[in-house]
Amino acid sequence: MTPNTFILSIVKKNPLLVSLALLSSFSGAIFSSVSIALIVPVVLKLLNFGDEMFQGGPPILMKILALADPFPEEWQGPILVAIILGMIGLKNAAVYATEYVNGLLSRRTTSYLQVSALRLLLSVDLDFFTKFKIGDITNRFGNEITRAAGALTSSVNLASISITILGFSILLVSISWQLTIVATLSLTIAALLNQTSIRRAKGFGAILSQKASQQSSRFLEVLRGIRLLKTVGEEQREIDEISRLIAERNHASFQSQMNFALINPVNELAGIASLLIIVLWGRTFFAESIQSLSGVILTYLVLLFRLLPCISQLNRTRGQLSNYIASIDIVSDFLDTSNKPFMKAGNLEYSRLERRIRFENVSFSYPGAEEHALNEISLEIKRGETVALVGSSGAGKSTLADLLPRFYDPSEGRITFDGKDLRDFSLRSIRRAMGVVSQDTFLFNNSIRYNLMYGSEEKTEADLIDAAKRANAYEFIMSMPEGFDTQVGERGVMLSGGQRQRLAIARALLRNPDILILDEATSALDTVSERLVQQAIEELCNDRTTLVIAHRLSTIRNADKIVVMEQGRIVEVGSHHELIEKGSAYASLYDAQFSQENKDALQRARVETLMDMSYEVRTRLNPMIGFLNLLVDDDVESPEERQELIEDSYDASVRLLRTLQYMENSAKSATIVRSLPLNRVS
């Protein structure tokens, strides 16, 4: 879409406001030009120079001046002054109306574009967000849309100023077409000089948009990664980098500002030159009647002098519009739906799963990727079943789960719910019937109540409390300063990982989804938090169709069906006991993880033992050192006390030696136990 087409499309959205702006501009131009043209003859009349100095003036001015003729001569001057003041008042009213309408038009345009952008962002597929940086999107949504809306205002201002110039030009031509030709030629030279600045303004606008986008993207990345930044101590590096981007943006803005600053001096010089040239040519054109037409020529010069700022404003507005062209191109492309991925929605309303979900020869590859992430997946999930997906990283577990809520559609094959193609259901109904609890729980920077009720605003307070209790979250919520109204901070930073997970489970319980997807919901938690979250998950999964992506195999041993995936394919399906007895891929994964878990447990026990040993040794050693210090410092009152301290030191040394012998024997026993082979536990 070209800039002119884009502006025209916005104009069509607000035809009444644009028409009012142009009408008020036209009215203001008429009142302004006529009132200024009347000033010279009225001043001459008030100074009693007589009417002969204004012979041959424009008919419209002569008719207005004639309005005072029926009145006594002493009243004619005040009446003409009142007419001028009235016209100036009407002109200012029209100017105010133009500014008001332009401001309203700008706000409506900005709101319309931002709402359109928001609607588009919430409609496009997730693939769109993998290609765009959040900072770029934020910059387009804020800065670029504001500048694009400014282009419409500049266009309306351009039309308004053109109308004003047209009104003045008509009066100038009516006074003297010869002088108008001379003035036009002089001002055309200034316009040609300004054209260079206008062309440069477009380039500066593109650079400014680019630098603003880079600065916004980097700034958001720093805020999102503030923990990492502080962990590695790179604050100064980011300060230097963002300072450089700020300096580059300010430099581009300064260049653009200086480019605009050239327009006024050029216009002023051209205007003064035009006035002087017109005076010289006026002596030539009206040499014979210069005395009688001096008032007319003076009126012409006053009108022209008033016209020059309008021409300067016209050139500045043209430069400003050119500066906004880059933003129009960016916003036009951003709002273009033809180059973005959209998920096609069906018309069927989903209610509940009656029998089963089936993946029928499903293959999938991410947009732009050459290899399939999923290859010929065939799987059946019956209503009420808990199906676990296991496998190494990159096996395709999360990709398979993402197909259920239609974050993506299969490249080949299909997914059916009770025999109906998933793509035939409306997106809203199918997604509202699903609950997703992932490892990375997102929480709004708002209260616990807001986060739990999000998407379930129709639920009652009793429902909220019940969901929190079933998710093992009620106790820690009520221990917070403001209970359910406690603020959780950005992305829930005020809560622990286990607390965030339990809130996510409570939110899912409150929604009461028909189908549940758990994406490694406990993989990043400590032992205590995992146990609490696992209990909440068991409550959540009760009587639901559940798809679980598991990292810790110990958490899914009771699943109805375990699906083992490798490189986007299903290699095994069965229960925990069936797959263990089979002794293939799942058994290998389980053995490796079980061994690692035991190693981790032994390591934790070793650390705890060392800490206990250290404490015990210090307990025995400290009193002995105290006794010996008293003996060395000779801080004793009698030989009996000295002998008593020596005996106490001896006893403490014996106890310390026995403690060390006990620890040595315990360490030998632990070594023997660790050397025994581990039996497979099923």
Image (cartoon, rainbow, N blue to C red):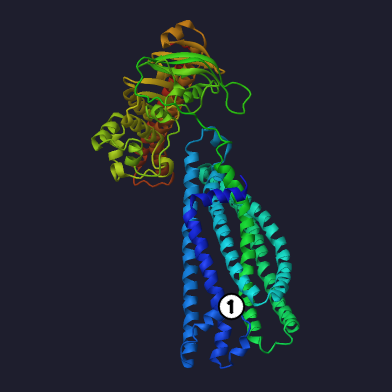
**636 up-or-down from 309: above or below:** above
Return the residue at label 1: 59
**Quarter holding residue 324:** bottom right
**Quarter holding residue 263:** bottom right
Q: Secondary structure at mark 1?
A: helix
Q: Nearer the viewer, residue 88 or 152?
A: 88
Residue reaching furthest to the front: 70
Q: Is residue 631 visible from the viewing direction of this image? A: yes
Locate residue 64, reporting x and y percent: 52, 80
User: In the image, what residue occupies the spot 47% across and 41% down?
Assistant: 119
Q: Nearer the viewer, residue 141 or 272?
A: 272
Locate residue 496, reporting x and y percent: 39, 37
Q: Nearer the viewer, residue 217 or 66?
A: 66
Residue reaching furthest to the right: 284
Q: Is residue 232 visible from the viewing direction of this image? A: no
**Quarter holding residue 553:** top left
Locate residue 254, reporting x and y percent: 64, 61
Amino acid type of the residue tagged 1 in the rendering: Pro
**658 up-or-down from 28: above or below:** above
For the N terminus, give its image quadrant. Answer: top right
Q: Nearer the viewer, residue 256 or 345?
A: 345
Number of dots carrying numbers: 1
User: In the image, what residue occupies the spot 57% across and 85% down?
Assistant: 41
Locate residue 286, reporting x and y percent: 72, 84
Residue reaching furthest to the top: 582
User: In the image, what residue occupies the spot 60% across and 46% down?
Assistant: 330
For the C terminus, give its image quadrant. Answer: top left
Pointer 1 local density, CA inside 10 Å: few below 14, some 14–19, many at least 20: few
